């Protein structure tokens, strides 16, 4: 039987088997990962039944990710205050109820509302689970291995989501994909009080609701501006939205510095190891998020593969990440973890070298697959160490806030990467297409559409070559970013 403890109290009691607790924490992460990706499979059938407007369809797809990124810092602080096990159990119940309601929704607004609630619950469960892993496995090497196993479950959910969603929609109705969450969360509700230790910070003060609202509004506006830039290009609307979001973010930071009980302790960023790791997480998420967009377009549009064949080509990279997430911790028990991290980040950089050297013709497919395998394997091996560094270098009473801050850096990095790398690729694409075709308007999406509708093989070849040139430029940018990442890792070691 576990007991609740605080940072100043006795060490948390051990569960009968920490591995059972880890398995229980991993189950919701598997489900949350599936829920992130499965809606893309279900959305066409949902649109046919619910008849959403274009705006409603966009919110149905995006609201979950918005709420995860916007509320993660707040939910991490709540977990530090009320107890991480309690927060996981409460949010598991909320997630189960919201999933059941979403499955039987009869209007687009119901999907939007329930997906928003599920996003908030998911944002609470993940950082609280990561913080508890450090309590279950106090030995640093075992903690890294446990973090790798947790990440494996999350990545497995991302990999199998399209297959699971496709099968369920083929034989049942679109609402069945939401019902997946109910039994998993019920298991968490029943087994959580028996298997999970409790931990909360002592005397943290009242929750800063005004700061939570500023944090949510700031992140939502910044991410919304980045999405507008990706979808519609540069205009005054995303610029104003981003400016307001950044302004609210500045107010939030100032408020946290002046309060005695801040929502998030920004002094964590000044602790040895934490600030640099946050930078590494942000930069690696930036290049990975941006290149995922180019990889999908390259395989389907530039090489003409069907969605199924493109998915098969991407399967090795997902498997490589899953294997690396367990191989990295295994190596960390035999050699220095810092060497494992540097080696993994170097492997990741090699993936961007492959992107920068994509040859013309069909042989480019093999090079892109190789680059994706190297990049995903590198980050897969390094990520458990990076997250463990954030948590172990933070005070135990702030571990939940630190984990949520790291996850938020990851989410914003992905969104920023779509804009930055998308802009770089677009500039190079237009320049290359203008030199070969004499004109270049719009993005490569427009170019592929125009070449396909006009059935012009010459124009299609020019668009494909211009897009590939943009992809190579993105690879070069990724090499530069990874050089900065390696410097961030090497600098502390030199001191």
Image: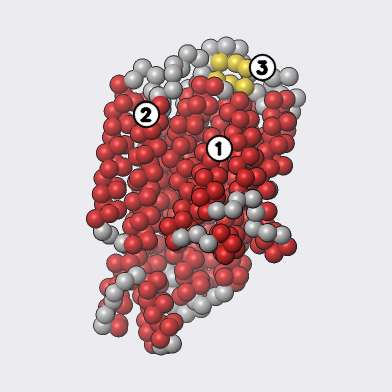
Q: Residue at x 46, y 56 (%)?
A: 56
Which residue is labeled 3 in the image?
Answer: 3
> In the visual, does 34 lie left or right of 259?
right
The label number, if any, that marks residue 211 in the structure image = 2
> In the visual, does 49 lie left or right of 185?
left
- Render colour scheme: secondary structure
The label number, if any, that marks residue 280 in the structure image = none
Which residue is labeled 1 in the image?
Answer: 121
> Image quarter for residue 92?
top right
Q: Residues within 10 Å of mark 3 (few under 14, many from 20)?
A: some
Location of residue 57 with respect to 435 vertically, above or below:
above
Element marked by disc 2: helix
Q: Residue at x 28, y 28 (%)?
A: 254
Q: CA distance from mark 2 to mark 1?
A: 19 Å
Q: Earlier in the sequence, mark 3 or mark 1?
A: 3
Disc number lying in front (2 or 3): 2
Disc number lying in front (3 or 1): 1
Whole-percent x and y of residue 263? Answer: 41, 26
Q: Residues within 10 Å of mark 1 (few under 14, many from 20)?
A: many
Q: CA distance from mark 2 to mark 3?
A: 31 Å
> Image quarter for residue 461?
bottom left
Element marked by disc 1: helix
Whether residue 437 is visible: yes
> Do labels 3 and 1 touch, CB within 8 Å?
no
Whole-percent x and y of residue 191? Answer: 73, 30
């Amino acid at each position: 039987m576990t007991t609740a403890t605080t940072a100043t109290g006795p060490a948390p009691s051990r569960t009968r088997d920490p591995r059972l607790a880890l398995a229980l924490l991993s189950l919701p992460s598997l489900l949350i990962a599936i829920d992130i990706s499965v809606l893309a499979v279900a959305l066409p059938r949902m649109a046919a039944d619910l008849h959403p407007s274009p705006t409603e369809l966009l919110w149905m797809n995006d609201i979950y990710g918005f709420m995860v990124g916007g509320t993660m810092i707040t939910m991490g602080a709540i977990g530090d205050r009320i107890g991480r096990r309690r927060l996981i159990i409460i949010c598991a119940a909320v997630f189960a109820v919201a999933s059941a309601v979403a499955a039987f929704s009869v209007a687009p607004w119901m999907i939007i509302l329930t997906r928003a609630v599920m996003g908030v619950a998911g944002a609470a469960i993940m950082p609280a689970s990561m913080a508890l892993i450090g309590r279950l496995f106090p030995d640093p090497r075992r903690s890294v291995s446990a973090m790798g196993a947790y990440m494996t479950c999350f990545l497995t959910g991302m990999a199998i989501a399209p297959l699971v969603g496709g099968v369920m929609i083929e034989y049942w109705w679109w609402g069945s994909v939401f019902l997946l969450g109910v039994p998993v969360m019920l298991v968490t509700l029943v087994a959580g009080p028996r298997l999970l230790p409790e931990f909360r910070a002592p005397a943290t003060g009242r929750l800063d609701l005004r700061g939570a609202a500023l944090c949510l509004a700031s992140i939502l506006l910044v991410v919304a501006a980045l999405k507008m830039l990706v979808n519609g290009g540069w205009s005054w609307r995303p610029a104003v939205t981003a400016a307001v979001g950044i302004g609210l973010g500045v107010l939030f930071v100032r408020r946290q510095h002046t309060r005695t009980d801040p929502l998030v302790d920004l002094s964590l960023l000044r602790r040895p190891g934490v600030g640099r790791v946050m930078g590494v997480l942000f930069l690696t998420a930036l290049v990975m998020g941006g290149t995922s967009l180019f990889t999908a377009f390259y395989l389907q549009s530039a090489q003409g593969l069907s969605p199924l064949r493109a998915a098969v080509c991407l399967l090795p990279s997902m498997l490589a990440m899953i294997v690396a997430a367990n191989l990295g911790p295994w190596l960390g028990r035999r050699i220095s973890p810092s060497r494992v991290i540097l080696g993994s980040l170097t492997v990741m950089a090699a993936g961007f070298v492959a992107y920068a050297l994509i040859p013309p013709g069909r042989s480019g497919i093999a090079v892109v697959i190789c680059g994706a395998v190297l990049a995903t394997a590198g980050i897969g091996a390094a990520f458990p160490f990076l997250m463990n560094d954030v948590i172990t270098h933070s005070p135990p009473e702030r571990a939940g806030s630190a984990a949520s801050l790291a996850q938020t850096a990851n989410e914003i990095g992905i969104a920023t990467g779509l804009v930055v790398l998308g802009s770089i690729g677009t500039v190079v694409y237009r320049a290359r297409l203008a030199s070969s075709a004499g004109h270049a308007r719009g993005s490569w999406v427009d170019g592929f559409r125009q070449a396909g509708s006009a059935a012009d093989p010459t124009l299609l070849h020019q668009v494909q070559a211009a897009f590939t040139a943009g992809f190579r430029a993105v690879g070069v940018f990724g090499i530069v970013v990874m050089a900065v990442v390696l410097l961030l890792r090497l600098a502390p070691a030199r001191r």
